[in-house]
Amino acid sequence: MAIIKSLLDNDLYKLTMGQAVTHRFPAIWMKYKFKCRNEDITWTPAMAKRINEELDYYCTLQFTKEEIEWISKLRYIKKDFVEFLKIYRPQREHVKVVNEAGKLEIIVEGPWFLTIYFEVPILAIVNEVYFEETVIRNRTSYGLQDLFKDAELRLVHKINLAKKESFLFSDFGTRRRFAAYWQERVIEKLTKELPRNIFGGTSNMYLAMKYNLTPIGTMAHEFIMAGQALEGVTLASSQKYMLQAWVDEYR
């Protein structure tokens, strides 16, 4: 079963940055590279194969009519960008997976306005594949049901703390999630148990649409970083240049 089943299973700020990039920087060529920060992890051929298969499937997805209608209702998304999203589909040739001596390398390269959407789904895929291979399949006496039972207990404890302390928070867990199933379970329970003045929403667009939540997010540091490499823009003025581009797009 596929890990990413919808192009909306992504963070909102990839969409808002995507609109700005499509309008302001359509000719910029980008290259991203995945880096595993845990140096002691060995990535098996089976993991790399599964990641490739997941990316194959991801690159067959398109936004559905229902998803396009939801996006079009976001007040800051422009009509011409919605028309672009109707025909957008991730291109498989833009992403390559290499596994040499147990070291995983994922490289995304292509036009910025087409490749910007890969980051979060790739990280979600890598995380879930890793946990499936190292945590779920290696469990014997302590099975998967026990794992999620413990997770439920921790979730209930945290919800009770949130009710007691009464602080506002939002979910930004897509790229770091244990599994798509578990993130949705968390969102479902938070939505039922907490009022909107405590649980403010989620950055995950698919879950925001499904559970009628506020989608949360503005931009990521990717947008500012790109400005540092633009031809004709000095490093000293790059942040001001990119922030001005953002203001010109959204006012």
Image (tube, helix red, strand yellow):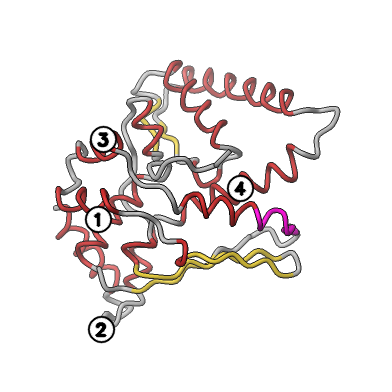
Mark 2 crowd level (few <14, some 14–19, many ≥20, 10 Å Cα) = few
Which of the two labelled residues, at mark 2 and mark 1, occupies the earlier sequence position? 1
* Upstream in sequence: badge 4 or badge 1: 1
Q: Nearer the viewer, mark 2 or mark 4?
A: 4
> Does the magenta-highlighted stretch encompass residue 47?
yes
Compared with 28, 162 (above or below) is above
Q: Quadrant location of the N terminus?
A: top right
Q: Amino acid at mark 4?
A: Asn
29 vs 181: above or below: below
Q: Earlier in the sequence, mark 2 or mark 4?
A: 4
Q: Which residue is mark 3?
A: 70
Amino acid at the residue labelled 1? Gln
Q: Nearer the viewer, mark 3 or mark 4?
A: 3
> Label 4: which residue?
127
User: What's the CA distance linking mark 4 and mark 1?
Assistant: 27 Å
- Residue 161, compared with residue 69, is above or below; it is above
Q: Which residue is mark 2?
A: 232
Secondary element type, mark 4: helix
Bounds of the magenta segment: 42-49
Residue 19: which numbered mark, if any?
1
What's the amino acid at mark 2?
Answer: Gly
Q: Earlier in the sequence, mark 3 or mark 1?
A: 1
